[in-house]
Image (spheres, helix red, strand yellow):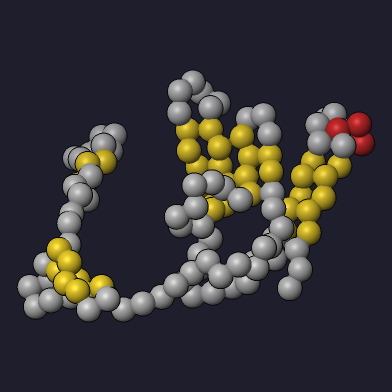
Amino acid sequence: MASNSWVIHGKHTNTGKPILANDPHLGTSIPSFEQLQEMSWGNEGDYISGASVPGAPLMFSGRSKMSSWGSTAALNDISDLWQEELNEDKSQYRVDGEWRDISYVEEIVKVKGQDDLIL
């Protein structure tokens, strides 16, 4: 498996802006670990959008109003699958032979024109 990225300098494009092409050649898997994200804040135009993996504090490939970036495949082991064991009333889970309490955090998502979504 390989991956590639390339950039064309703005002096070689019709718009005068550079072009970035990025293809990290990530393998396919089930469940898929890549996810598309977009975050916005503050003023209009303050955003980033791109691809990430769960738990990563960044987008490995993406863009904002002023820049874009990409990466090539690092071929890391980035996923683990396991089956959780719960007690009978589903209030605890087992870790290393020890039962631990399950804690819950309630999140309220405001949806325009609809009732709040409580997760």
Residue 56 image point, x, y percent: 49, 52
Residue at 78%, 53% in the rendered image = 5
How many callouts does the rendering have?
0
Q: Is residue 64 left or right of 89 when viewed as pictured?
A: right
Residue at 62%, 45% in the rendered image = 62
Q: Is residue 2 left or right of 117 when viewed as pictured?
A: right
Report whether residue 89 is seen.
yes
Is 82 in front, or is 33? 82
Residue 101 image point, x, y percent: 15, 63
Residue at 83%, 45% in the rendered image = 7
Residue 82, placed above or below residue 9: below
Residue 105, placed above or below residue 87: above
Residue 59 image point, x, y percent: 56, 47
Furthest residue in direction top, as rendered? 43
Residue 22, placed above or below residue 33: above
Residue 9 image point, x, y percent: 87, 37
The image quadrant of residue 88 is: bottom left
Is 64 in front, or is 115? 64
Furthest residue in direction left, as rendered? 89
Residue at 76%, 50% in the rendered image = 21
Is 65 in front, or is 99? 99
Report whether residue 35 is seen.
no
Q: Quadrant of the N terminus?
A: bottom right
